[in-house]
Image (cartoon, rainbow, N blue to C red):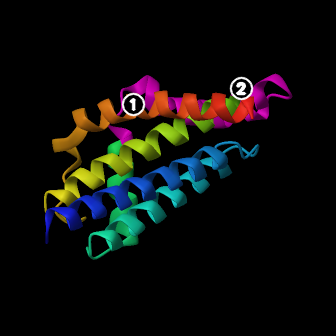
Amino acid sequence: MTDEERTARFDAANEITKKYVTASMSAGLIPIPIVDLIAVTGIQVKMLHSLAQQYDIPFSNNMSESVIGALLGGLIPTEATMSLVGSLSKLIPIGGTTMGMITMSLFSGASTYAVGKVFIQHFESGGTILSFEPSKVREYFKAEFEKGKEQAWQAQESGAAA
């Protein structure tokens, strides 16, 4: 594979991630608790499937759910529970629903961004879903999650302005 082909593949993978970050943020706005979490998980699995296709890597739905869960479970406890609290706060009329939707949208976008970036790096280095070891990328995932929060916040602000 030429450098140009690698660059094109890498750029396409980043576009895939960007598309699914937007979808995840939208799913985070679902006003029904837990349904939003299920939708975001489905979007992340679909993103991983799209990335695997981009890199011609065999895909397993069950393995994908497991590795995504392992990555998200590795976030510091306050970040990992943010999604559940955000989802459940939607049960509180008006203010809770609004706050929950904002929180879930940000968490969903940030976590999807981080999952995408981690798997792009893994696939770029020749890894597969079966060879993925969440413990080896935990710090990178946390750093990308922080970048994802910033990106999600900017996207949310620009969306609110529009």
Could you tell me the amino acid type at mark 2?
Met
Q: What span is in magenta?
A: 72-99
Residue situated in front as seen by the camera: 11 or 116: 11
- Asked if labels 2 and 1 touch by Cβ distance under 8 angstroms, the answer is no
Q: Residues within 10 Å of mark 2 (few under 14, many from 20)?
A: some
Q: Which residue is painted at 44% across and 59% down in the image? A: 16
Check if residue 42 falls in the magenta segment.
no
**CA separation in Å, label 1 and label 2:** 21 Å
Depicted 115 relative to depicted 93: above or below: below
Residue 63 is tagged as: none
Q: Which residue is mark 1?
A: 147
Magenta part, dominant SS: helix
Q: Secondary structure at mark 1?
A: helix
Q: Which residue is mark 2?
A: 99
Check if residue 95 falls in the magenta segment.
yes
Q: Quadrant of residue 101?
A: top right
Find residue 68 and report its horizontal and vertical position in percent.
37, 52
Depicted 146 relative to depicted 116: above or below: above
Q: Which residue is painted at 60% across and 44% down in the image? A: 25
